[in-house]
Image: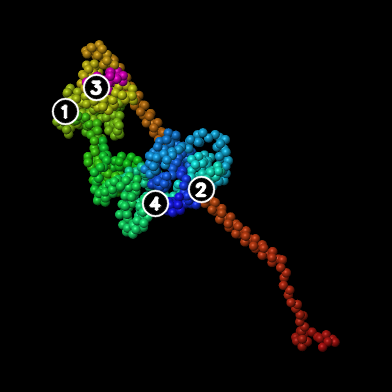
Amino acid sequence: MSNNRIDHILAHFDRTSEQFFSKDEFRAKLRSGKKLRIKYGVDVTAPTLHIGHAVNLWLMRYLQSLGHKVVFLIGDFTTRIGDPDGRLDTRPVIPRAEIDRNAEEFIQQAKMVLRFDDPELIEIRRNSEWYDKMGMDEFLTLTSMVTHARLISRDMFQLRIDSGREIYMHEILYPVLQGYDSVMVESDVTIIGTDQLFNEMMGRFFQEKFDKKPQTIITTKITQGIDNKHKQSKSLGNYIGLAHSPRDKFGRVMSIPDALIEEYFRVYTDVPLEEIDRMADQIKHSPRESKIKLAYAIVGRYHGHEAAVAERDWFEKTVSKGLVPDDIPTLALVQPRHELLDIVAQARPDKSKSDSRRLIKQGGVDINGIKHTDPDAELIFKTNDVLKVGKRNWFRIEVVKLNELETEKLWMRPMRVEDVDLIQKYLPDWEIVKYLSHPGLSLKAAVDVAREVFRRVILQPEPKDEWIWKIQHKDAPDKIIGVAHLRRDSAQGSENIWLDPQFRTPELMEQALHAVNEHAFSQLGFSDVVFKKAFAHAAAPQDLDALRRRFMSMDATFRNRDTPEGIWGFTKEEWERQKEWFLKNRPEAALQPRAVNKRRKSARLDAHLDAIEDIVEDALEDRAEDREEAMEQKKQEREASFAMKMAADKHAAELKQEEERRAAEIKAAEAKGETLKAEAAKAKPPKLPKVKKLISHPFLLGGTKPTPGKK
């Protein structure tokens, strides 16, 4: 290959690459004309690729266009270990089945960039191919080539050491395994992010140990995520994923800060650099228009020109002009009255309730163009209301008539909480109370129990185990004339339908029973093995004549179906009695009162046992939740205590250093004083001049006489 061609290739790499180890080696490999093997190793812990990862993929795709081969290495063995990757905590072990699923998702996303259609350009490998077969002696030979000091020098290990956290041996050995991968796949080049530099340098190290030419390592530029605070991360939600739809990609690009526009153009698009330079003034003065061009370029790169045009038009129509899109999804509501927080949480199942509450308070939710900022507000929704959540998510509300029943003369609609008080106007309290409460309770206590049972059933989420309908006559739709009750568990009385005596005719009773029976068939079905016996959903008649009448009122397609579990709408005991009646053909037969009373007592006992079992299960669940909360609180307390201890230890260390510094200063001052004192002691005192003795003049007062013989 000519030097000009090589310079052209390197210029292409310079746009998104950061470092070469080394560029001269890469030049030599290109000049040789050899078909290069480009290693692309993936840890399939989480199958999410974003456009940051795709920077490496596009460079590999460029090399594929030159005839070189990408070795797509699935780290299924090393994923079980988990690369620390800058974490202060040990990563959890991933099951093999999940690894296989993640690997397949990785490949599907990588196909958006790499060519997988030509075996001359792609080779898929798994490092379990050699590690599952590696013996202990071979592994020890491998580890003997590298020192502990070299491995422990990795920056994330140093962070753990500084913070007093454990480092496990399998984590220390991870770079050894990833490095040896380069030997096994005969890697010539690998293109990575800077976080993998240590591991791939280990690959060069092992290749040299095995007398192979070391791979060229090319690191690529890493930009901030769409929040301009952290690098792109699925956990932070600040990324643009390859698996995101064209609409999501377009919208996420439009949300980036203005400061990222030019950098995203250079790193994440194939727009010529000269054109980007010419756009500098527009980026500065018209950032919104520049973002639209950027979003168009990114969507077009992954999904094609037509998708990019469609998303640009959609964005300008909906977001810019404030119009509601035509193709928004439907959000089905079982009943019209809901708290706003519950509806927003239903529209955003992947978000927490606290996040939805925060979005509402920040003004991110409106209904029919009107903002609502109270998460606890109870609203009444209508079909075709438009709910907008965030900047780009619309939902068309549909209040579905779920579980509504209709006969020739009756409407049977699911009861609402506010209907509980109304039924007392039309039904004697004791009929419902006797059915729903426990025997022996006072009337007041029984009424409270019954009201609570109604409330619990009404508020039960779908799929329900129990239903309560209010019965209304079509001639008087504003009046509740009765109540129907259907449940899975067991019978607690001889009748599950109550009608106002004014309307209690055989015809209306038959219509109501028939509707409830059909609902039981459609909701539960014959093949549901959860129900080990047939339950009294609609009736538990006292005599075979009533049993026959109700059975014969059912549709023939239901009546003739056979099942060992019995017919829905009757207890299994009633089913056995029904078979007995058909065999003997004695419609006049009836149970004796004693047998009936015994059956009723047995049913009540079963019901009480079921209730006690439910109470015990609820208590155990509450206890488990309390235990989990206590463990979580203890965990938080331990972490807080650890943080306080670390802070206290740090403060104590700083105080100790300060005391030692002061003590050292005092000691140095004392030593200096002692030195000066010693030097002063060694020095000789100065010699004083001799004082001449004064002799007084003889003529002065007090003078002495002159010495004889001397003048």
The disc labelled 4 sits on which kind of residue? Val
Q: Cα distance, mark 1 to mark 4? A: 70 Å
Q: What stretch of residues is rendered in magenta?
A: 556-575
Determine which of the numbered discs, if any, sits on residue 409 in the image: 1
- Badge nearest the viewer, 3 or 4: 4
Q: Cα distance, mark 2 to mark 3? A: 71 Å
Image x and y of residue 81, in percent: 48, 38
Residue 566 on the magenta span? yes
Task: Indicate which disc, 1 or 4, sits on the residue closer to the N terminus.
Answer: 4
Q: In which quarter of the image is the C terminus?
A: bottom right
Secondary structure at badge 4 equals helix
Secondary structure at badge 2 equals helix
Main SS, magenta region, reads loop
Q: Viewer-proximal residue, 477 or 600? A: 477
Q: Cα distance, mark 3 to mark 4? A: 66 Å
Determine which of the numbered discs, if any, sits on residue 558 in the image: 3
Task: Indicate which disc, 3 or 4, sits on the residue closer to the N terminus.
Answer: 4
Determine which of the numbered discs, if any, sits on residue 267 in the image: 4
- The answer to whether residue 57 of the structure is visible from this angle is no
- Badge nearest the viewer, 1 or 2: 2
Q: Cα distance, mark 1 to mark 2? A: 78 Å
